[in-house]
Amino acid sequence: MDKNLYSNLGNKVNKIIPQKGGVDFLLSDFLDHRFNLLNKEDYLNAFKNELKLVLSKGTLADLIDAFFELESHHHLAETRVGFETKDIRFDDFYKNISPVILKALSDLKKEFTQEETKKIEQHLLETIRISIEDEFDSFLTKEIH
């Protein structure tokens, strides 16, 4: 049996492919074993790509669900990689968003019509989106080379 057989077989699976059909890889792709995260740079890119998808959600419920999914993906993925991802923390976000949400709610009228309900949801959607962007700004704006 050829001594190099196993190393050759390993070269044919789980390669990092920077893009799949024009869309960047996500943490969820890593969790589905579509590629490996070999270093922190790849991890941060996948996190950033998934974070951008979260921010693109058009309804409050979708945004919140996607954010919780991102948090879950992060916690699962960080247990499977061989390097530290300690600079991505959700605890600070939750601590910082509480006063922002309370302020947004206090800005809203107590009684509202059906039309105003849509305005309220849109206002909360933008408030939460801005809070996420502010908290994770370094991952969205950081140029990873």
Image (tube, helix red, strand yellow):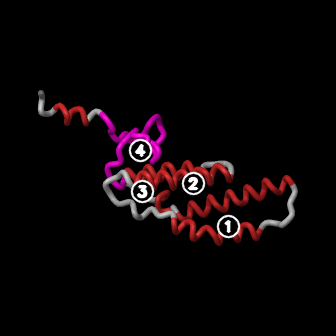
Number of the front mark, 3 or 2: 2
Task: Kindly identify the amino acid type of the residue bearing the numbered disc 3.
Answer: Glu
Contact between marks 3 and 2 (CB within 8 A): the answer is no
The residue that disc 4 covers is 30
- The relative height of residue 17 versus residue 123 in the rendered view (above or below) is above
Residue under the point 51% across and 63% down: 90
Residue under the point 70% across and 71% down: 103
Q: Distance between the residues labelled 2 and 4?
A: 17 Å
Neighbor class of circle 2 (other Cα within 10 Å; few <14, some 14-19, many 20+) is many
The residue that disc 1 covers is 101
The residue that disc 2 covers is 67
Whether the magenta-drawn stretch holds residue 111 is answered as: no
Whether the magenta-drawn stretch holds residue 39 is answered as: yes
Neighbor class of circle 4 (other Cα within 10 Å; few <14, some 14-19, many 20+) is some
Disc on the earlier residue, 2 or 4: 4
- Residue 143's tag is 3
Q: How far apart are marks 1 and 2 (CA)?
A: 16 Å
Which secondary structure type mostly characterizes the magenta part of the structure?
loop
Residue 145 drawn at (x, y percent): 36, 53
Res 3 → quadrant = top left
Disc on the earlier residue, 4 or 3: 4
Residue 37 drawn at (x, y percent): 35, 48
Element on which disc 2 rests: helix
Quadrant containing the N terminus in the rendered view: top left
Could you tell me how many numbered marks the image carries? 4
